[in-house]
Amino acid sequence: MLKVGITGNIGSGKSTVARIFSQLGIPIYDADLRAKALMLKPFLKQAIFDLIGHDSYTENGDLNRSFIAQKVFNNPALLSQLNAIVHPAVFSDFDEWVLVQTGPYILKEAALLIESNSYKNLDLLIVVLADQSIRLERSMKRDGADEASILVRMNAQMPQEEKAILAKFVVHNNNDLLIPQVLKIHKQILDLVR
């Protein structure tokens, strides 16, 4: 079974593209969603609490995402330490997930697929691209955040053009039609599997 990564910078629409693959019957591992779930597990919770502080979690034990984002996206060293805690847990979780999947290929969707080096354990990479102005608008609308906080997050990410260099496939998502692009990539991946 081929392991295919899909990534893109904030607001690029990688989750939308992944959902189209899902409609084609391809299993999707959402690394960002799984990371949030794993961060609620006691073994990670204590490490995050020790690193970032008691405000990392709400009174009812939920992840305080806005507090964590505010802390780590303004402090690259702290972000790196947080990633060093969370990424190994996500890698293990993904490996266990892959073992129970069936089908010609699976997709691992993650914002930091390249930055975490986990793309090196995959067979192919898809990168979703969109202009910064479009990504900014989408992110502000989706997250209910102001422009400055989204720009801080954007600036913390590797430039999308550098990610595209590593990709086998690129999806353009400004005002482009996504389904024809996904269908073409899906067919090409199936051809590689055969």
Image (tube, rainbow, N blue to C red):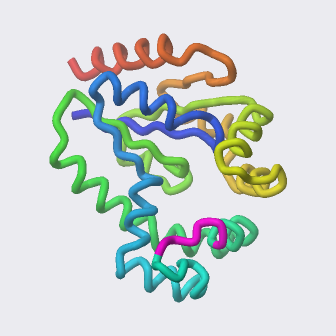
Q: Is residue 121 magenta?
A: no
Left or right: where 106 falls relative to 99:
right
Left or right: where 19 falls relative to 68:
left
Residue 58 % position (x, y) = 54, 78
Between 92 and 121, which is closer to the camera in this rendering?
92
Which residue is drawn at the image coordinates 29% and 36% (left, top)? 27
Between 184 and 174, which is closer to the camera in this rendering?
174
- The quarter holding residue 78 reads bottom right
Residue 40 % position (x, y) = 41, 72
- The quarter holding residue 127 reads top right
Residue 54 % position (x, y) = 57, 87
For the record, the magenta segment spans 62-67
With respect to residue 95, does 103 lie above or below?
above
Left or right: where 38 falls relative to 62:
left
How many numbered discs?
Answer: 0
Between 73 and 116, which is closer to the camera in this rendering?
73
With respect to residue 115, does 54 lie above or below?
below
Which residue is drawn at the image coordinates 36% and 81% (left, top)? 42
Which residue is drawn at the image coordinates 61% and 22% (left, top)? 172
